[in-house]
Amino acid sequence: MNLLSTAPLVLRRRGGIATALPIIGFTASTGILATVLGGLGAFASRAAAAPVGDGPPSAEASNLSFLMSCAIVATVLLVPSAMGLGSAAAKLSLSRRERDLAAVRLVGGTTAQVGALAVADVLAQALIGSLVGLLAHLAVTPALTALDFGMAPFTVGELLMPLWAYPVLVIAATLLAGVSAGIGLAGVAISPLGVARDSRIVRMSVVRLIVWAALIVLFIAAFQILPQIVGGIPNGIGVLIAVLAILMALVLGSVNIVGPFVVWVVARIIAAVAPGPALLVGARRLAADPRAGWRAVSGITFGLVIAGFLTLTSMFGNMDETASERALSTALHTGGLLTLGIAAVLAAVSTGVTQTARVLDQARVYRSQHVAGATVSALQRARIAEIAIPLALAAIVAGLSAAGLLAPVMSGGFSLGAVVQYIASAIGALGLVALSVAVSAPLVGRVARSDA
């Protein structure tokens, strides 16, 4: 079978929503990555240019080293989430083409041809989304110069990445999408009926839970032990920050490893004891596809972890004795709010895309259940149960992860203001999910009543 002759079949577009959702995900992912990395570069350039002399350092110079460490932490918190959104967009793009994959396979296409065409489609959408994301990054950068970090305002030139970094970022984002699509294909049985039947192999192991817990323990141990080891080493502080940043990134990455496992276990338990049909249906859907269920709330999970870190910055709010302390307090407050704001944007896009995509993915199920007698309101209740279970688990996993990362520096206890701020941030993040559910709710009735 000729690969070129089958390409138009797979690469054709099925409609505005199906095409726009993955591109929106790639746009947000690349745009936020460029903005975050540009900000980190701005702090790095300021720190490198800070004057070193015999006299007392200025307030800005004395704070730059610490702020650079905070910028690294913020980058470590945000980059995995942005990359995760890009990976989710790739898998979403792949799922939009399952009927086409089945058609190509049924008319004689080989497994390699089906895989190559599917990955090519994902790469095309990733490239378009990445380029649009860079344009969005360039558009919002001038507004970021108005932020007050307790020092001379950043210029647009400082907040932009080097020119060579932009094509590298586009290539990296596109390749990441291709790799994610390839991994996604590995979970589909690409046989003449395998794709059409959505034959996915659900493999969940307790090793996921062990890895997550072990990484948190390792981070806490490293935070306690490494300062004593690197204390006498030249540039020991830099080594310490780098190691802790890597461990922090691993902990955050492991959230998306343990999440599907927890959803799978809890969903199976709830399905066994569910008192009503809505909860039973929602739990069985999650047990059948726990990764998709977790993907729908993964952005909110990172948002809640970021909110936990924001409580730490609020504890520096009383540093107002000297100009240096006032500047540091201003920088921490601004940086914390900016980090939470970026995380909220990631969560909004991720939640909106994945929730809408799940309705489209399950369109045939909704139609068959509606034809069998289920009312639209009953389908909505089942969908709410399908969302509420991973959402509650996400709040628990995020809270435990944030507590583990903050435990080494919060030995003195939480202040009341910090607790109130975390609760307010968590309510805002959870409200964002509720809003995304409400926005996509009318689509359930539309697909259920559709004859297509």
Image (tube, rainbow, N blue to C red):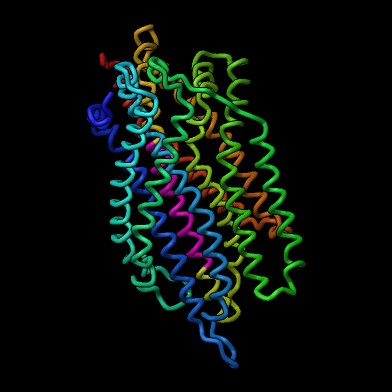
The residue under the point 30% across, 55% down is 136
User: Image quadrant of residue 255?
Assistant: top right
x%, y% of residue 246?
A: 60, 56
Please tell me whether residue 335 belongs to the stretch shown in magenta.
yes
x%, y% of residue 157?
A: 34, 72
Near-viewer residue (309 or 319): 309
Near-viewer residue (228 or 348): 228
Where 2 falls versus 164 (above or below)? Answer: above
**Magenta residues, start to end:** 332-353
Give the residue furthest to the top: 372
- Going by the image, does 108 lie left or right of 236? left
- Going by the image, does 61 lie left or right of 233? left
x%, y% of residue 395?
A: 57, 39
User: Image quadrant of residue 103?
Assistant: top left
Any part of residue 309 in sight: yes
Task: Specify the quadrant that holds the N terminus.
Answer: top left
Task: Specify the quadrant that holds the C terminus.
Answer: top left
> Magenta residues: mostly which secondary structure?
helix
- Going by the image, does 165 lie left or right of 64? left
